[in-house]
Amino acid sequence: MSILARPREIARQTPDDRLRSIDMVRSVSMLVVVFGHWLMALVWINTLGEAQFGDALAESRVLQYVTWILQVMPLFFLAGGFSNGRSIVAARKAGTPRREWLASRAQRLITPTLPVIAVWSLGVFALGRFIDPGLLRVGTIAATIPMWFLAVYLMAVVAAPFTYAAWERWGFASVAVGAGLAILIDVLRVGFDVPYVGYLNFLVVWLTIHQLGHGWDRRPKPRTGWLLAGLGLILLVGLTQFGPYSVAMVGVDGAKEMSNNSPPTIALLALALFQAGWLAGMTPTLEKWLKRETPWAVVILSSGFTMSVYLWHMTAMVLLVLVSLSFAQGLLQAVPLSADWWATRPIWIAILIIITLPLVLIFQRFEHRSARRVSRHPVALGFGVAIFAMALAATVTLGLSNAAGETRLWIPLSAFVGATLAGVVEIKPKSTHGI
């Protein structure tokens, strides 16, 4: 039976008015990030036989410009804003309570993410005594770093009923307010050196892009879209060439310029404008192409495992690095960014795909688990999602292991508590029947 048989059947039943380009954007953006991580992370054995870790972006200014294409999370948040808005409208029409809507959306993200935290927490507990604590911490952070965006996106889901209400009332003015607030925060951060204020842009910048997605039904016409893309590109060039912002749209180790990703800056908003304009310009062409059965069936197929690939692709790379350091150091002999290094990248990525595949087959079931109905108050649900998001943030920034190689138990415990409040984990009271 063809792997596309079922997706083709679904494709034939898809309503003509579905905005298929948004589904494609969500899947493609996640896969682009996966290949970007695999390509940009550097691991090699130096002439002294020592393992070295680095970042291709730190070694090449040219590659930093490539992030203007590879940093596609703005498109993901835009697509998320559109989908969340559509879902809210559908829930209203169906009379679905807000708590059920929130539980359903949050569980889609929490359910496949919880096993990553559980597996790596158990791994640290089991192997912490046998692996160098520093190497273990690097490995856990590398494996879990893709979850940073889920922490922010979960907050966008919690805020979606309110941000969509703002969209319905004020339209694009609500997007402008968000952009203005992000600019103010950057002015305070850069111009007045106000400490820590920049971290507010983790929510402001990404929620502004998410807000733009709420209005994607009223996206600009293609010609206007291309003009907006040009404006975004001009702003991007101006901010990075004449302003304090880094050229790279992701974090770069050792960079002298201000990071655009942690915390986000208005340069990332300029990138979002560039990408949104491009998408508006390309939408008619993409929609026409996706009306064809095969391309649309491929999008349907890929959307069924994209989240699992995203969550486990760095685990696959950590496993490959550990095996290579122990048994196959020849894979790590090429000098980074040399001709030999580039020539071996297809082999490197092919091996990573092979390692990722069984991980996806094992854990994909969590991606497709149906959301459970919960009776909790929306405030309790939101509180649970917030706790889980903070656990994700702690996982990425601190790592699941401490300096002694021991599991930071409070992180997985916090994730478990948050998941329980969000209805992902159910604790049933012990039966007293027969007592």
Image (cartoon, rainbow, N blue to C red):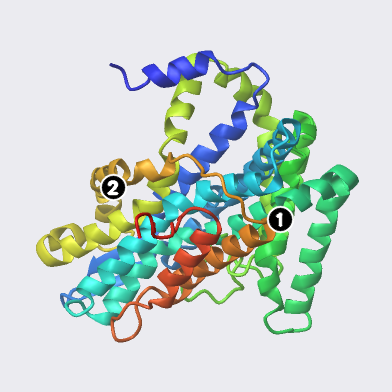
User: Label 1 sits on what residue type?
Assistant: Ala
Q: Position of residue 389 (x, y in %)?
A: 55, 64
Q: Nearer the viewer, residue 174 or 379?
A: 379
Q: Position of residue 141 (x, y in %)?
A: 39, 69
Q: Quadrant of the N terminus?
A: top left
- For label 1, the crowd category at 10 Å Cα-Cα, with few meaning under 14, some 14 to 19 and many 20 or more, is some
Q: Nearer the viewer, mark 2 or mark 1?
A: 1
Q: Position of residue 244 (x, y in %)?
A: 68, 72
Horizontal side of residue 216 vs 101, given as left or right: right
For the residues marked 2 and 1, what is the alpha-carbon distance in whole angstroms?
32 Å
* SS label for mark 2: helix
Residue under numbered circle 2: 359
Horizontal side of residue 224 vs 67, given as left or right: right
Q: What residue lies at 66% left-to-right and 58% top-to-bottom?
A: 268
Q: Tell me the number on the disc at residue 159.
A: 1
Horizontal side of residue 391 vs 117, given as left or right: right
The relative height of residue 81 versus residue 118 in the rendered view (above or below) is above
- Which picture quadrant has residue 120? bottom left
Q: What residue lies at 75% left-to-right and 31% top-to-bottom?
A: 93
Horizontal side of residue 10 vs 203, given as left or right: left
